[in-house]
Amino acid sequence: MLSPMRSRRILHPTDLSRASGRAFAKAVELAKDSRAELVLLHVYAMPVQMMGEAYTPPAAYAQMEASTRRAAQKRLDALIARARQAGVRARALLVEGTPHVRIARAARSYRADAIVMGTHGRTGLARAFLGSVAARVLASAPCPVVTVRGA
């Protein structure tokens, strides 16, 4: 497991789902035990604008993006408040992009000592079809990755 003396910063990527709750709890626990800063990261992806009948005017697209960011920031702020109530130094990052790429980039940028993230535990066709962000992070992370299976 992680050495409490070595961890200065723990990155917790979250999709803000109920399934990520266990990983959040583990990230808070590890940050508290090691007196590390907890960095909560949410990566969102906006749908690609389409041409033709499904075209979204730029103003409407900008409004959708702003609404998406506001909703995600509100949920991140609630998690930050919970982490701070537990006695953990915490901050939030909200970025757009491909989740596994942005998670690995954030881990490097913030010099994370560990990444603590949830996994949905999909297998078979669901995993093959939907992919696994956790598996991709494991392959590209610059630090140890702790995965916690969601409920």
Image (cartoon, grey):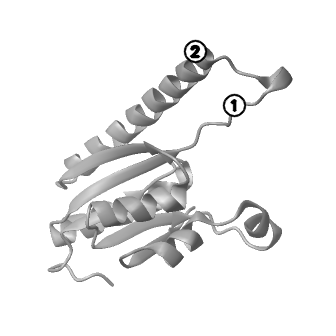
The amino acid pointed to by label 2 is Ala
Residue visible at 73% across and 60% down in the picture: 130
Residue 129 located left or right of residue 147: right
Question: Residue 79's image quarter?
Answer: top left
Kindly report the distance in space between the C-alpha atoms of the residues bearing marks 1 and 2: 12 Å
Q: Which mark is residue 122?
A: none
Q: Position of residue 121 (x, y in %)?
A: 64, 69
Determine whether, in the image, residue 84 is placed left or right of residue 68.
left
Residue 138: x percent and y percent? Answer: 50, 76
Q: Quadrant of residue 46?
A: top right
Q: Report the residue marked by disc 2.
A: 59
Q: Residue furthest right?
A: 53
The location of residue 65, given as percent across then percent down, is: 53, 28
The N terminus, quarter of image: bottom left
Secondary structure at badge 1 equals loop
Depth check, front residue: 81 or 59: 59
Q: Residue at x 37, y 66 (%)?
A: 26
Residue 90 x/y as whole percent = 23, 51
The crowd level at tag 1 (other Cα within 10 Å; few <14, some 14-19, many 20+) is few
Of residues 84 and 63, which is closer to you in this image? Answer: 63
Quadrant for the C terminus in the image = bottom right
Q: Earlier in the sequence, mark 1 or mark 2?
A: 1
* Left or right, 56 with reference to 60: right
Neighbours of disc 2 within 10 Å: few (<14), some (14-19), many (20+): few
Q: Amino acid at mark 1?
A: Gln
Residue at mark 1: 49
Secondary structure state at the residue bearing disc 2: helix
- Left or right: residue 46 versus residue 34 is right
Q: Residue at x 52, y 77 (%)?
A: 139
